[in-house]
Amino acid sequence: MEELVVTTDHTSYPVFIGEGIRHQCSSLLYDILKERSKVLIITDETVAELYADDVVRSVSNALSAGVCKVPSGETSKSMDVYHKVMTACIQEGLDRQSIIIALGGGVIGDLAGFAAATYMRGIPFIQMPTTLLAQDSSVGGKTGINHELGKNLIGAFHQPAAVLYDTETLHTLPDKEWRSGFAEMIKHAYIKDPEFLTWLKENVHSLEDIKDSQLLRFLKRSIAIKAEIVKEDEKESGVRAFLNFGHTLGHAVEKESGYGGMTHGEAVAAGMIFAMKVSNRLGYSKWDVTQEAEWLKALGYPIEAPSQYSSHQLIEVMKNDKKASKGNITFVLLEKPGSPFLETVDERTLAHILEETKEGGVI
Amino acid sequence: MEELVVTTDHTSYPVFIGEGIRHQCSSLLYDILKERSKVLIITDETVAELYADDVVRSVSNALSAGVCKVPSGETSKSMDVYHKVMTACIQEGLDRQSIIIALGGGVIGDLAGFAAATYMRGIPFIQMPTTLLAQDSSVGGKTGINHELGKNLIGAFHQPAAVLYDTETLHTLPDKEWRSGFAEMIKHAYIKDPEFLTWLKENVHSLEDIKDSQLLRFLKRSIAIKAEIVKEDEKESGVRAFLNFGHTLGHAVEKESGYGGMTHGEAVAAGMIFAMKVSNRLGYSKWDVTQEAEWLKALGYPIEAPSQYSSHQLIEVMKNDKKASKGNITFVLLEKPGSPFLETVDERTLAHILEETKEGGVI
């Protein structure tokens, strides 16, 4: 088992990473659970069937546990499902001394985290990610749900009391989900760790290469990068914004494909390539975009996806993104691996590059 | 104009109290507004008609202002109206550099404050209370909405960036609203300031006595008490809980009367008298409950209201109150003015006192 600690201005919490550790909740989380009145495990239907019983058994040594199941998929990050989760919290009798466990992927972490942030003005929660993507989102305290008009527009910063990451749960994931999660690891490497990036490019040529014995090492390095950035800037007023590399267009593509259509990581991969093009176009960098794109394509990322959608529509969505300021669209650009910066990009430049992509140009 | 400062662990903010100061937003709030991209004034239909134009004009010197109107009354503290407010924030183009103004009574302060706490994971907001009751709720950072199963069960702690209290707006209030707000001032006196309590009892024999020239002095003292308690305990883990004096039964009565049926302060007044009875019954105090009740009745408080409702039902609601812990019902009791403490009270005792009240006993 690997262990690391995330520290912010107001709190710090442990991250446990290991095979089969979902069976060790009551020992690993003893200090956190011991003074709590009750735990509610919030999970989705798919994950519930696989792991909910294990977790209930594992925490039941410490305290009484209920389970709240929501439908699987991004559509559960809605106001309607949030409302139902709050109802479940009340009906299960949670009080201010209770605690929530988010058992599932990023959708569950965001939804259950937001429920914890706002139930009775805030109770603690534990992240138990079960997807590769959630290695990223489970650390750092961002919680929230979607609005019909944009992703993650409703939410709160609420750090978990602990993250318990059982890598055994990853083995049942479909390839699409491995790809989605691996995109965020690649992103961490791009923005913060050129050495890690080189190492990934040399060693990972297919999804199978991710799943092997190097996985724990990948994960620990990736989470450590995230933890470093969160430590510097919990509320995203500075460097934390660099974690949005690939996300400005990524979120727009994800939205246009219909939440749940394209995976988050797939959209982000396309967004990273797009950001490199923007970076080149504005004269900040000399990326060999074709080469970067080839590596991602070999891993199965649909990086030409943005060309399927209306440029105008993608730009409108980007303007409504919560990172937008005064109607301007801000991108994280990369001069080279490890050197990110923020830049406001005008609509015309974006439209131009999007149109070029459509015509099969640029790459 | 009176001015005081509220300080918490993480922030501090000014409270301005004065006649007609809604016309001075851009000067009084200059430091807060100057770096903001946009302001959205959230208000209700009644208040909008009276004061929204004044505030728009007053802030327009500093920055662009939109107005979002919701229906008047407690029913707007719903998930549905909250959703609509978030939609308005998006459609008005608010970004992370924007700010919200809550212009209205406690309902608007709670709703708009919760919107600010959760829009894009939190943007700042300004409280502009327009009722006497909101002198209390506008200070201290409690925000939230109701769930069908209980009041204020969904919310967040989010301190305002400033409170601007134009007492001219109080003159249009109906007596019921003066009574509601005055109950919280009485409560502050009961739990923290025996001298203030004596002074109120000697000088206030009718609602008209509140409205006169002493009002600014009352308000400043009442808000200062609240600020002192919030400073000591922002997140309600200790002394702040004493502010719930009268609220355990108060919330239950308010809920049973249908939100909007009995005013908050009216229910709290009944709750304070009930808490004194509980305090006596458990041997902690020797309140002359009849005398305390007479004073409140003379001011028009319906302190016998709890006898209209089923004791069983009131107790069930109290058990779901978010101050309840592990299913126990916790009361703020008073040994004497200025000496509050927390006590878990068993259901049987509560049922007994509620039944006695029904039979016209005890008082």
Image (tube, coloured by chain):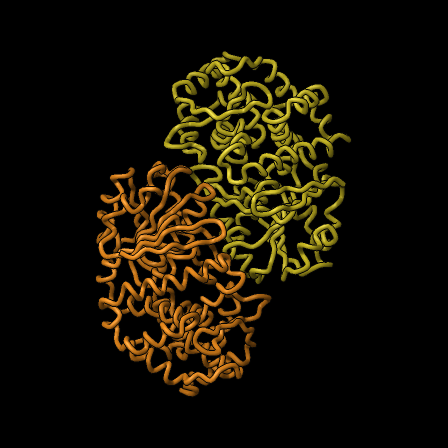
Chain colours: A orange, B yellow
Q: Answer left or right for A171 relative to A219.
A: left
The residue under the point 43% across, 29% down is B318
Where is residue A354? Give x, y as percent: 46, 80
Q: Answer left or right for A86 relative to B139.
A: left
Give B265 or A143, whichever is nearer the viewer.
Answer: A143
The residue under the point 43% across, 76% down is A337
Q: How many numbered circles does the render carry?
A: 0
* Image position of B93 with respect to B72: above or below: below
- For the C terminus of chain A, which image quadrant? bottom left
Give A187 or A319, whichever is nearer the viewer.
Answer: A187
* Image position of B226 with respect to B39: above or below: above
For the question of whether residue B23 can be seen, the reply is: yes
Where is residue A270? Give x, y as percent: 39, 75
For the question of whether residue A71 can be seen, the reply is: no
Give A243 or A213, whichever is nearer the viewer.
Answer: A213
The residue under the point 45% across, 66% down is A243
Where is residue A8? Give x, y as percent: 46, 53
Q: Answer left or right for B311 relative to B6.
A: left
Q: Answer left or right for A42 relative to A147.
A: left
Where is residue B227? Give x, y as percent: 62, 37
- In terms of image quadrants, where is residue B234? top right
* Image position of B172 with respect to B85: above or below: above
Give A332 or B261, whichever is nearer the viewer.
Answer: A332
- For the N terminus of chain A, which image quadrant? bottom left
